[in-house]
Image (tube, rainbow, N blue to C red):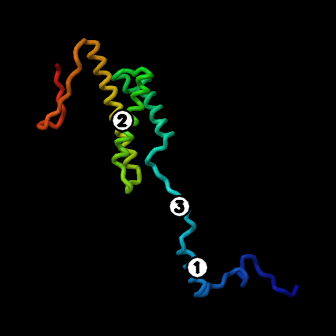
Amino acid sequence: MSDPQIAAGTPTEHDSPTPPTDSQVGDQAKESTKSPKSFNTSFSIWPPSQRTRDAVIKRLIETLSNPSVLSKRYGTVPQEEAAEAARLIEEEAYSFAAGKASADDDGIEILQLYSREISKRTLETVKARAASDSTAENGSSPPVVSTTTNEETPSVEES
């Protein structure tokens, strides 16, 4: 064995890369500045799909017609009435939010507005229903809500 053996781990000229030339460095820089293949996919959170809107309505019906935090305070709503109210709540909230949307929005703020409107309208619905149920039981007319320009909050007057 006249050939010297190379110890493992000792670099040889085949193992160590030669430093890149200036033209190779320039070519690599050009490649890295090129934009990678863009897929031009966009993700939009607004407007919600019809499937999402239907799921919102279904959940509203469940909330209104089944025992919940709201029903403990305001009572449950019959299934048919809850279905009608849920559709109306969702449609009004959607229309309200869609009217506030602009092309500059990423959709998150509008979706939050939509959600808040649903919550607000749901609460208004159960409160109004509870008020009409209590006045029907008492045999009196419902309270009249009036607003004036001098007051910031509406006043309730018993008739």
- Are there few (<14), some (14-19), or many (20+) residues within 10 Å of tag 3? few
- Are there few (<14), some (14-19), or many (20+) residues within 10 Å of tag 1? few
Instruction: Find the distance from the CA under tag 1 to the CA under tag 2.
Output: 55 Å
Q: Which of labels 3 and 2 is toward the front?
A: 3
Counting labels gives 3
Which residue corresponds to the image point at 37% horizontal and 45% vertical from the top-left? Answer: 98
Q: Residue furthest right?
A: 1
Which residue corresponds to the image point at 39% horizontal and 22% vertical from the top-left? Answer: 77
- Are there few (<14), some (14-19), or many (20+) residues within 10 Å of tag 2? some
Where is residue 146 shown, x and y percent of the image? 18, 30
The answer to whether 157 is drawn above or below residue 50 in the figure is above
Instruction: Find the distance from the CA under tag 3 to the CA under tag 2.
Output: 35 Å
Name the secondary structure under disc 2: helix
Query: Image quadrant of residue 65?
Result: top left
Q: Which of labels 1 and 3 is toward the front?
A: 3
Where is residue 20 shown, x and y percent of the image? 62, 84
Q: Circle 3 sits on which residue?
A: 40
The answer to whether 121 is drawn above or below residue 11 in the figure is above
Q: Disc 1 residue type? A: Gln
Query: Image quadrant of residue 36?
Result: bottom right
Q: Circle 2 sits on which residue?
A: 119
Q: Disc 3 residue type? A: Asn
What is the quadrant of the N terminus in the image?
bottom right
